[in-house]
Image (cartoon, helix red, strand yellow):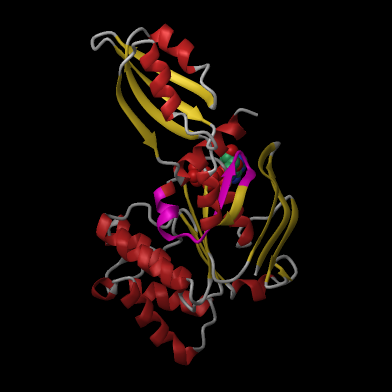
Amino acid sequence: MLVLSNVSKVYKGNIALHNISLSIPKGEIVGILGSNGAGKSTLMNIITGYISMSSGDVLIDGMNILDEPDAMKGKIGYLPDTPPLYEEMTVYEYLLFVSKVKKLAKESRENEIQSKLEKLHLIDVQHRLIKNLSKGYKQRVGIAQAILGNPPLIVLDEPTVGLDPTELRNIRKVIKELRETSLVLISSHILSEINSVASYLVIMEKGELVTAGPMDVQSDAAKNLQHKLFIRIKGDSAKIQSILKHIEGVVSIEGQPDSEKECCDFSILYNPNIDIRETLFWELSKHELPILEMNLQGNSLEELFMQTILKKKGE
Ligand SMILES: Nc1ncnc2c1ncn2[C@@H]1O[C@H](COP(=O)(O)OP(=O)(O)OP(=O)(O)O)[C@@H](O)[C@H]1O
């Protein structure tokens, strides 16, 4: 459905995207995750034909977006990071205007508008001027215009920004339902946001693709990451560190002595194939260093994100 081949974008010498290649089938909700400035908006702007790319190709259903720009417009619904709203229009007038721009068939316009007003809980405000709406409502109008006409590709740049928790739940539900008819791309720098709706994860950093794949595969990858253990030990920090670093499987140790409590807290990254807990216990007891607390830290997508991003930053 969506294929990117070596897509790059350079802004006056600044490389915003570097050789991004991706192939995503229909029926996925693709979560594009990356820190600020990673290139998410640039990528979305290119896929939707909003800005040009410096090199590469974007194919939607086998069609190059540059060869068929008009045909492509009908296939894509886009909510940029700043919703393109006409503030002097009412919500209804604006959606009617968008339905005309999208060239929806005259006889289906009214039904289509009403169904989106309903879906996004906008019925009560449909005759209010957009400029008088709260940020959350404006965001919902932005989403309504993007999904009007059920385009096969829907691109939502940070769609949940500015929403309160109730609105958030509603929008997540709407996004999940879109999967039935469309390929959906959403961006965020908040992992929990992506985690709650996406079926396919793309991680970007510094304009490059760090990892991409189905969410369950990514979760499995997270399980294979180095495991993390928190441990609180009573005793001398230097002595403890010298013992810990010789334990087989330990990859790195970060720790802080707490002078008031005469104990030290350590965060230990270790090889997932070796369970270091028993060895830790015996070694520390041999040296009469009591363990006050020990917790395994879950290996989540958060860790996958952090470790892949940190690896990239360290290059
Ligand atoms: N019009 C522009 N002119 C010059 N540089 C730009 C322009 N737009 C984006 N950039 C640069 O391109 C890089 C990627 O920016 P982009 O906005 O795509 O990132 P992002 O991941 O969407 O970030 P955010 O989450 O902050 O929106 C950044 O270094 C940014 O400064």
219 vs 198, nearest the viewer:
219
Please identify the quarter of the rendering in which residue 196 is found: bottom left
The verdict on residue 51 being magenta is: no
246 vs 182, nearest the viewer:
246
Spot occupied by residue 307 in the image (x, y as percentages of width and height): 53, 36
For the record, the magenta segment spans 192-210
Q: Quadrant of the C terminus?
A: top right
Q: Residue at 50% of width from left, 45% of height from top?
A: 223
Q: Residue at 34% of width from left, 32% of height from top?
A: 295
Q: Quadrant of the N terminus?
A: bottom right
131 vs 148, nearest the viewer:
148
The verdict on residue 193 being magenta is: yes
Spot occupied by residue 136 in the image (x, y as percentages of width and height): 31, 58
Name of the residue lying farthest toward the bottom: 107
Q: Residue at 46% of width from left, 13% of height from top?
A: 243
Spot occupied by residue 13 in the image (x, y as percentages of width and height): 71, 36
Can residue 151 be seen at all in this image of the molecule?
yes
120 vs 284, nearest the viewer:
284
Quarter of image, ligand 1: top right
Can residue 88 be seen at all in this image of the molecule?
no
Spot occupied by residue 6 in the image (x, y as percentages of width and height): 74, 52
